[in-house]
Image: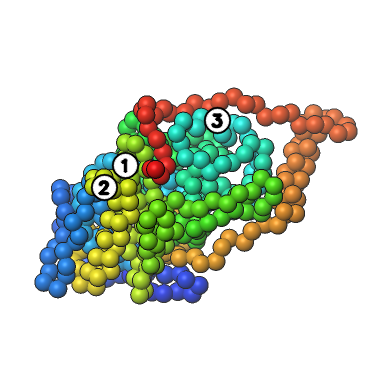
Amino acid sequence: MLAVPGPAAADGPHGVDDLRPGAHVADQGDANSRLDGRGVQFLPRRDVPEPPDVTALSWMVTDMASGKVLAAKDAHRPLPPASTLKALFAVTVLPRFSQEKVHTVSLRDLAGIEAGSSLAGLKEDLPYRVADLWHGVFLRSGSDAVHTLAGMNGGWDKTIDDMQATARRLGARDTTVESADGFDTPGQFSSAYDLTLFGRAGLTDPDFAYFASTKQAELPEDGGPDAFGIQNTNRLLVGSHGVRPYNGLIGVKNGYTTHAGNTLIAAARRDGRTLLVTVMNPQSGSRNAVYEETRSLLDWGFEAAPRAAAVGMLPVMAPGDSGDEPQRVVHRSQPVTPLHRAAVAAQTDADAHARYQWFLYAAGAVGVIALAGLGTGLWWRRRKPAGSRDGEPD
């Protein structure tokens, strides 16, 4: 059940910011109604600078600890989210599988991926840990990784339904999910407000926080002849394509499609304060506009946050909204412990042995029986408009 007011933060051990219920903020209903308004929402104060003039169609700046929305523009405007919708995918699916679980990618896993989608580079018949798949999702916006995890979750359509249910539970009333990977699809929309909710919910999960802040990884992480390096496409996190890395950036998720333009959910921490900025579709024409406008909003937010009045409040997360410990915002600095190759092989052998025993029992046979190959039928996929393209623009 969702309620206002927002929580307050205190530093915890191991880089964890523990969220605890904060004091009631007066006139919250009036403040939240401002977010329904058009244009820039900001309450001027003599000692608080005005927000920067940016070209994004929609944006929002939020103090994570207090839940205060410091300023926003068209926060509930429905817009295509591109790959920032993968934050909702991760909030929904990431807690359901152990990071150490091994899955061998099949042809069925890779079926139905739209032409032009970003890919992590997964290979058929190669075993990957679930952690490898999430590296593919967060660092490369890989639709092949999303499809594989969605298949493990019960299928593409079930995952879309699960994501929609998660969005409703979080209070995200502007989001309609039609494609689990965020690819341009008719009828699919989200908003700066909703994407902020997804980023906030994700950062309560230590694994989400780790993957969102990871700059580079090897895929598979355990190496081998098929392994290769991947780098996060979030330019504000890694510093690339003429963008300087932002000091204190935790990460979260960037996106781009032809119809959505550039989108970004970015969290940063400085001097004990964590801010979350969401920017959707800058209009300046600059290839790095989404990153530079996010930088400007973060800089303003850190300067204004101590004195700025709230134009809205995020709802308090109820238990079960994300992971097992939803009252924490986590900045995880230690990597997920990698499995050794022997452990991967042992897990694969154990899975094969279990299947073999089950087959013997079902068939009543004696001796060695080979497993039948998996079918390669394609699953049904919701279509995109012609000409859409996913991933980072050139």
User: Which residue is the site of mark 3?
Assistant: 111
Residue found at x 26% / y 60%: 297
Give the label, 2 or 3, closer to the camera.
Answer: 2
Furthest residue toward top: 377
User: Which residue is the site of mark 2?
Assistant: 282
Q: Is residue 43 above or below residue 183?
A: below
Counting from the top left corner in percent of width and height, residue 323 is at 48, 56
Q: Earlier in the sequence, mark 1 or mark 2?
A: 1
Q: Earlier in the sequence, mark 3 or mark 1?
A: 3
Mark 1 Cα shell of 10 Å, populated few (<14), some (14-19), many (≥20) = many
Q: Amino acid at mark 1?
A: Gly
Furthest residue toward front: 242
Q: Splitting the image into 4 quarters, where does residue 121 fall?
A: top right
Q: Amino acid at mark 3?
A: Ala
Q: Amino acid at mark 2?
A: Pro
Residue found at x 46% / y 69%: 16
